[in-house]
Image (cartoon, rainbow, N blue to C red):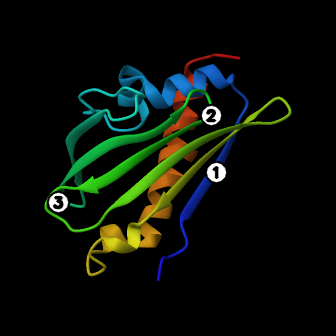
Amino acid sequence: MKAQPVIVEKIFNKPIEKIWESITKPESMRQWFFDNIPDFKPDKGFSTHFDVNANGKIYPHLWKVLEVEKMKRIVIEWRYGGYTGDSTATFELIPGNNHILFRVICEGIETFPQDNPDFSRESCTAGWNYIIGTRLKEFLEKSNVK
């Protein structure tokens, strides 16, 4: 049975172009997301990999871009080298009245080893809340773009 996706949302009062740049340009992504992303292109089929140290363990992140709708949506296949499981992370930008709703949808986390708390639903939810609710928020505020 497929589990419910993890969905985390944050409203930003910034131009959609600035948010899109923040989630697709490697020099921006390194400032708020992962500082060691070697490269990233919002192009279908683009893939990259890099290691992340979490809770004293090294997790090789294997990404492949599956879908792109410029200024609207990007879907990334998200796997971990050395671990079973396949997931996707979808980033959506939804315009509102003088704001942008940024939504992250993670699907497939239940396919990762469930005996590892780093792959739990709670860890995923807390991680995305921190990443977009704190790190991306601070990055966008620091950039002084109105």
Is residue 22 or residue 42 the one in the foreground?
42
Where does the image place residue 83, in percent across and percent down from the top left?
19, 65
Residue that carries the numbered disc 1 in the rendered image: 9
Q: Earlier in the sequence, mark 3 or mark 2?
A: 3
The quadrant of the picture occupied by the C terminus is top right
Residue at point 53%, 66% (across, down): 5
Q: Amino acid at mark 1?
A: Glu
In the picture, the disc for residue 72 is: 2
On the rendered structure, is 116 left or right of 72?
Answer: left
Q: Residues within 10 Å of mark 2 (few under 14, many from 20)?
A: some
Residue name at image x 20 percent, y 41 percent: 50
Would residue 8 be found to the left or right of residue 65 on screen?
A: right
- Residue that mark 3 sits on: 57
Q: Look at the numbered disc 2 and give the secondary structure of its residue.
A: loop
Percent of width and height locating residue 84: 22, 68
Quarter of the image for residue 7 reads bottom right
Marks 3 and 1, the one that precedes in the sequence: 1
| Amino acid at pointer 2 | Lys
Discs 3, 2 touching: Cβ within 8 Å: no
Instruction: Give coordinates of residue 122: x percent, y percent.
Output: 46, 71
- Residue at 47% in and 46% down: 131
Q: Could you give the CA–CA distance between mark 3 and mark 2, rounded to whole angstroms?
A: 34 Å
Q: Picture coordinates of residue 92 (x, y %)?
A: 60, 42
Query: Is 86 on the left-hand or right-hand side of 14?
Result: left
Separation of residues labelled 2 and 1 (CA atoms): 14 Å
**Closer mark to the observer between disc 2 and disc 1:** 2
